[in-house]
Image (tube, helix red, strand yellow):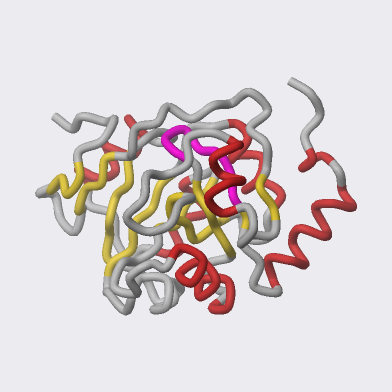
Amino acid sequence: MKKMIFDDTNFVKELNEKLHQGGVVSFVTDTVWGVGCLPDNEKGVENIYALKNRDRTKPLILMSDSVEHLLPYVKDIPQSAQELMKKYFPGALTLIFEKSDKTPDFVTSFKNTVGIRVPDNHVFKRLCEVTDGHVLATTSANLSHQPPALNYDEAVEFVGSHVDYVFEDYGCHCQGLASTVALALDDNIKVLRQGEVLID
């Protein structure tokens, strides 16, 4: 794999400056392409909703290279959810928990829950590693009600003119299947959207 732009310290500084100013980036994950911003930056979140023409009642989800970075954003993780995380993180599973006070209302559409995920994709992992806070508020790279981008060219076509950067995938392609989304407020896990991961 060729050297990534994330290995360039000057670029990393520029990237974080953009993100703190409300910047939005587009990137590959293990499922589909996404867009993201810093979770505590309301301007960035507003930019995502605007560029997608996204319904403001639909929350963003938080993603990171490590579950440890996501834990401060949730209040409690039931035992059954802990077992799912051990089995499927990193991977194509989004779990929804009661959010902590650290999670801004503007990320969750003023709901008291927040979805978290750790994608299994090396390029996304490197992006999070160099991003201040290591967490991004995210959604798919597309206009609302349209199919999500499945490769770099589609990401550029769908959102390229609306984001600060579209990062190449360096050969780490997405699978094209959305993540499974499950509500995990207690030990009774409820699947809200069936995706790549099949929960027993």
Query: Which of these two is toward me, 10 or 129?
Result: 10
* Count of marks, rendered view: 0
The answer to which of 76 and 137 lies nearer the viewer is 137
Q: Main secondary structure of the magenta part?
A: loop
* Percent x, y of residue 61: 40, 58
Up-down relation of residue 173 to residue 97 (above or below): above
In this view, the residue in front, 25 or 197, is 25
Q: Position of residue 63 (x, y in %)?
A: 47, 51
Residue lying at 66% horizontally and 66% vertically, measured from the top left: 23
Q: Residue at x 54, y 40 (%)?
A: 154
Residue 144 image offset from top left, x and y in percent: 37, 59
From this viewpoint, which residue is outermost toward the left? 188
User: Which residue corresponds to the image point at 36% horizontal and 50% vertical from the top-left?
Assistant: 146
Looking at this view, name the residue that lies furthest to the front. 157
Seen in the image, is 86 located left or right of residue 39?
left
Residue 20 picture quarter: bottom right
Q: Quadrant of the N terminus?
A: top right
Question: For this view, does 95 lie left or right of residue 120?
Answer: left
Quarter residue 179 falls in: top left
- Assess whether residue 11 is covered by the magenta stretch: no
Q: Which image quadrant: the C terminus?
A: top left
x then y, percent, for residue 18: 74, 66
**At 62% from the left edge and 48% from the top edge, which residue is drawn?**
128
Q: Is residue 194 above or below residue 175?
A: below
Identity of the residue furthest to the right in this view:
10
Residue span colored magenta: 26-32
